[in-house]
Image (cartoon, rainbow, N blue to C red):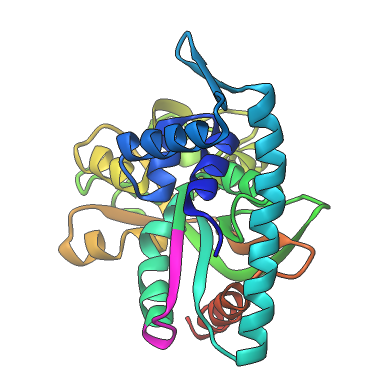
Amino acid sequence: MADRRLKIFHTVARLLNFTKAAEELHMTQPAVTFQIRQLEEQFNTRLFDRAHNKVTLTDVGKQVYVYSDRILKLYEDMTRTITDMTGDVSGSVTLGASTTIAEYMLPLLIGEFKAKYPEVMINLRESNSEDIVTMVEKNDIDLGIVEGFVNNKHLLVEQCKMDDLVVIMPNDHVLAGEKELNVVDFIAYPFISREHGSGTQEAITGYVEKHGNGEALNVCFELSSPEAIKGAVEAGMGISIVSRSTIIKELKLGTLTAVELNPSLERPFSFVRQRYKFKSRAADQLLAFSQAFCKED
């Protein structure tokens, strides 16, 4: 069937990075390098230039990449046709998710999906919402699930569910006794923010611009995950705004305080995908299963 060595080459050529390719392929970097060398020996020429810590394709490598892309796509088309004819649901799906969704929603979703379709391999790519949308647009992943609103006319965007955000703070914070907070109530306090490109941060920024009377948040840190933000808040380094779904454990343990926003702040979790049909029946089933999962949640 499709030559694994060709798939390894295609991944390295697409990413132009041996380390990232090894991570995506779940291989060690030396193993990836060995397979590329074997392919270069087969063609009796170099496929990559490796100079000044930069990887580029040679002229021959560019041609091999074009043909490998066609070959792998034909293989995927063949696999889809056969599985549609036989009714089997197997193969692999590459799913991308923004950080909050990947850490707090997907473990249960994927677990239930695998219980129903054990032959399907799910490759999960986690990043911020902006990066996930870009991956879908480049066709690097089959399906993305992201936070916030997505305005991309080239992609299909479908709402999964609405997510509620709240202000979190240490239990001894001066605002901890409030039942609800307006932006002006906390705008001056040190604020721990998500990184640029995060769907959560985009929602918060738009909310503050709308309700903050022209004032900006007093950002003291930018952190790249909900877990890091919760830890910093618990340590008394500032307050933040996070998805309610990320703090269920902390509220049960009483390690931090959550206060409602007034007006409330909601943003959607959305499916993002290409406009044409999926390459595999497995991807079709994952989307349908995820849609049903969101309705039941």
Residue 173 visible to an observer of this rendering: no
x%, y% of residue 233?
A: 27, 41
Residue 152 vs residue 230: left or right? right
Residue 47 lies, with reference to residue 145, above or below; the image says above
For image coordinates 22% across by 36% down, the residue present is 236
Q: Which residues are magenta?
A: 115-123
Which image quadrant is residue 73 in? bottom right
Nearer to us in this view, 296 or 117: 117
Number of residue marks: 0
Task: Verify whether residue 116 appears in magenta.
Answer: yes
Left or right relative to 240: residue 136: right
Residue at image location 37% in from the left, 58% down from the top: 103
Q: Position of residue 109 (x, y in %)?
A: 42, 75
Q: Is residue 289 visible?
A: yes
**Vertical side of 13 occupied by 176: above or below:** below
Q: What quarter of the picture does the N terminus occupy?
A: bottom right
Relative to 282, does residue 116 appear above or below in the rendering? below
Say left or right for 76 vs 48. Answer: right
